[in-house]
Image (tube, rainbow, N blue to C red):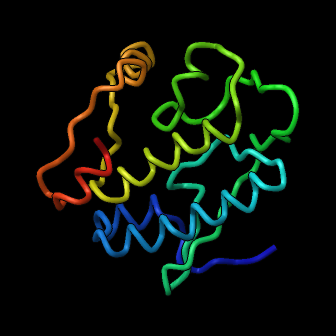
């Protein structure tokens, strides 16, 4: 087990605010690499969110908390799991799903959170939250560069 002194991305966002596009790009690149490593070995994380991304003083990330992790080779998964704000539509529809693909959805939501300081879909309760995610409509904040806005469209 390794101790990472920087805490997690959630704490960093709460104390320091949103990441710059350059910081977000560097962290995202590392996060995609970590997921690629897991996915090539047949493991889906299934609970990617800022609280599960540890950082050190140099903003090097470590993916943590594989409590919902599942072997993703073979049949599709059906476990209703993840954190609602980062949950893929397939899970909310109670469909069998590809664990690696739902991780990719969560990667996008996590990137949005890192760059804007908020999640793209926010409802007052579980039902409203579910509706917003399933509708897929969200606003791209004006604070992002044209290039970053294009990434989220």
Q: Where is residue 110 in the image (x, y as percent from the top left)?
A: 45, 50
Image position of 70 with respect to 128: above or below? below
- In the picture, measured across the screen, residue 97 lies left or right of residue 127, that is right
Quadrant including the N terminus: bottom right
State how many labels appear: 0
Q: Where is residue 100 in the image (x, y as percent from the top left)?
A: 68, 42
Quadrant including the C terminus: top left
Q: Position of residue 27 (x, y in %)?
A: 48, 70
Image position of 14 with respect to 107: above or below? below
- Of residues 146 and 35, the one drawn nearer to the viewer in this rendering: 146
Q: In which quarter of the image is residue 130?
A: top left
Q: Where is residue 17 in the image (x, y as percent from the top left)?
A: 28, 65
Which residue is located at x 74 percent, y 62 percent?
37
Residue that sits furthest to the left in the current view:
142
- In the picture, measured across the screen, residue 59 lies left or right of residue 144, that is right
- In the picture, measured across the screen, residue 57 lies left or right of residue 74, that is left
- In the picture, measured across the screen, residue 78 lies left or right of residue 104, that is right
Which residue is located at x 56 percent, y 70 percent?
30
Which residue is located at x 64 percent, y 69 percent?
62
Which residue is located at x 56 percent, y 19 percent?
92
């Amino acid at each position: 087990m390794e101790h990472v002194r920087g805490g997690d991305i959630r704490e960093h966002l709460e104390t320091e605010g949103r990441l710059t596009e350059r910081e977000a790009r560097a962290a995202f690149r590392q996060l995609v690499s970590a997921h690629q490593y897991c996915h090539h070995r047949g493991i889906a994380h299934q609970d990617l969110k800022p609280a599960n991304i540890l950082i050190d003083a140099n903003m090097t990330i470590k993916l943590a908390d594989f409590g919902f992790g599942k072997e993703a080779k073979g049949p599709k998964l059906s476990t209703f799991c993840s954190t609602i704000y980062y949950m893929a539509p397939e899970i909310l529809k109670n469909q069998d799903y590809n664990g690696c693909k739902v991780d990719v959805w969560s990667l996008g939501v996590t990137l949005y959170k890192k760059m804007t300081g908020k999640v793209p879909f926010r409802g007052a309760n579980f039902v409203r939250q579910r509706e917003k995610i399933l509708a897929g409509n969200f606003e791209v904040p004006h604070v992002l560069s044209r290039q970053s806005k294009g990434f989220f469209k």
